[in-house]
Image (tube, rainbow, N blue to C red):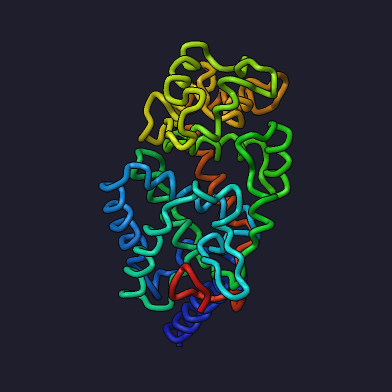
């Protein structure tokens, strides 16, 4: 009888855990039975992609970020134009800059081969982001999963809710706050710019005519300014790429913050975290610049927090068979 009671209790506990995962609570064990090798499959594809394009990790984490900031982490950024779908890919923050969609498609194809109809595209973005960070030398963490995919896109929301690289610190802070993210989250998540590239068009205004003054941004280190002007000369291509982190451009580390301390942040929104007098972000930049461990710990918590923005769970949404289109 005692053994039977233990079995019943175990079954009830397992059922309760499953229902918890299905009814609005993301959990690290969501796929433990339905697709136990999901992380291995995702990692294999990301590793292959990294061999062909060192920017893969930065591209994937940016997709996750831009996805979560528009109606929550629901995979909506991945949808192509279709009947009733106006793609977020064509929104100003994403057009000709968001990338990595082919890697997501490859991950989805591989997962459909082993766990058909199980793993959402929204979860693929979250898992691929964690794996990309870890492969770059950053922290590892258990990703809460169980998101489902949207059946709609919101291009207008993508145009208005994704922070601009030209925004002021007050503007960016308020946009993060609207998503339930505080100043520590803002600084920690900005630290993802420790790897990746940006096109000249996203920062060239800082080099020549900042805020219509006819002069460069006074917060840029003079030697760094000279280097950037060589990369992005006046009248040159606005599509030329520059490293977001000039010291270790392909590694996930805390050099992004030591760069800010040296006035070597690439984007206006990067440098303003440190150069805005009286801002609470300055002390956070200093803390992360002085301790990579503190940055890594905060980054993990902020990624989990961002990944929890309004996910579709339970019977909401769907599990897309193809990340580019609804079922």
Q: In this view, does 2 lie to the left or right of 70?
A: left
Q: State the residue lying farthest toward the front.
A: 235
Observer-nearest residue: 92 or 319? Answer: 92
Q: Is residue 85 left or right of residue 291?
A: right
Observer-nearest residue: 300 or 165? Answer: 165
Q: Residue at x 30, y 52 (%)?
A: 49
> What count of labels does the image hold?
0
Residue 259, position as x, y percentages in the image: 48, 22
Residue 185 in view: yes
Q: State the residue lying farthest toward the top.
A: 222
Observer-nearest residue: 180 or 66? Answer: 66
Residue 252, position as x, y percentages in the image: 40, 36
Q: On the rendered image, what quadrant is the N terminus found in?
A: bottom left
Residue 281, position as x, y percentages in the image: 65, 28
Q: Residue at x 72, y 20 (%)?
A: 278
Q: Residue at x 69, y 31 (%)?
A: 169
The vertical placement of 110 against 48, above or below, is below
The vertical placement of 171 against 53, above or below, is above
Q: Which residue is drawn at 42% across and 69% down?
A: 31
The vertical placement of 174 against 116, above or below, is above
Q: Is residue 163 left or right of residue 263?
A: right
Observer-nearest residue: 160 or 32? Answer: 160
Residue 316, position as x, y percentages in the image: 62, 75
Residue 289 in view: no
Q: Is residue 291 left or right of residue 164?
A: left
Q: In which quarter of the image is residue 230?
A: top left
The vertical placement of 229 against 59, above or below, is above
């Amino acid at each position: 009888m005692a053994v039977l009671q233990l079995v019943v209790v175990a079954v009830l506990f397992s059922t309760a855990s499953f229902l918890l995962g299905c009814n609005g609570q993301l959990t690290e064990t969501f796929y433990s039975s339905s697709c136990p090798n999901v992380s291995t499959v995702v990692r294999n594809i990301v590793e292959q992609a990294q061999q062909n394009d060192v920017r893969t990790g930065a591209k994937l984490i940016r997709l996750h970020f831009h996805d979560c900031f528009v109606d929550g982490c629901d995979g909506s950024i991945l949808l192509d134009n279709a009947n009733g779908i106006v793609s977020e890919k064509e929104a100003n923050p994403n057009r000709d800059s968001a990338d990595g969609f082919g890697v997501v498609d490859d991950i989805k194809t591989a997962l459909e081969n082993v766990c058909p109809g199980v793993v959402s595209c929204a979860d693929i973005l979250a898992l691929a982001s964690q794996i990309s960070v870890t492969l770059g030398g950053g922290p590892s963490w258990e990703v809460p999963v169980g998101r489902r995919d949207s059946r709609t896109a919101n291009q207008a929301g993508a145009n208005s809710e994704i922070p601009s690289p030209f925004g002021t610190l007050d503007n960016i802070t308020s946009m993060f706050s609207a998503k339930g993210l505080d100043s520590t989250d803002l600084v920690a998540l900005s630290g993802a710019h420790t790897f990746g590239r940006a096109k000249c068009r996203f920062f060239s205004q800082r080099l020549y005519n900042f805020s219509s003054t006819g002069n460069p941004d006074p917060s840029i280190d003079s030697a760094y300014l000279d280097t950037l002007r060589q990369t992005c000369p006046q009248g040159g291509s606005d599509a030329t790429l520059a490293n977001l982190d000039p010291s270790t451009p392909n590694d996930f580390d805390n050099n992004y913050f030591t760069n800010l301390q040296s006035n070597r942040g690439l984007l206006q929104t990067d440098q303003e975290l440190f150069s805005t007098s009286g801002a609470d972000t300055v002390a956070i930049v200093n803390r992360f610049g002085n301790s990579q461990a503190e940055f890594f710990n905060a980054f993990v918590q902020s990624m989990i927090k961002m990944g929890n923005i309004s996910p579709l769970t339970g019977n909401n949404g769907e599990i897309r068979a193809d990340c580019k289109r609804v079922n």
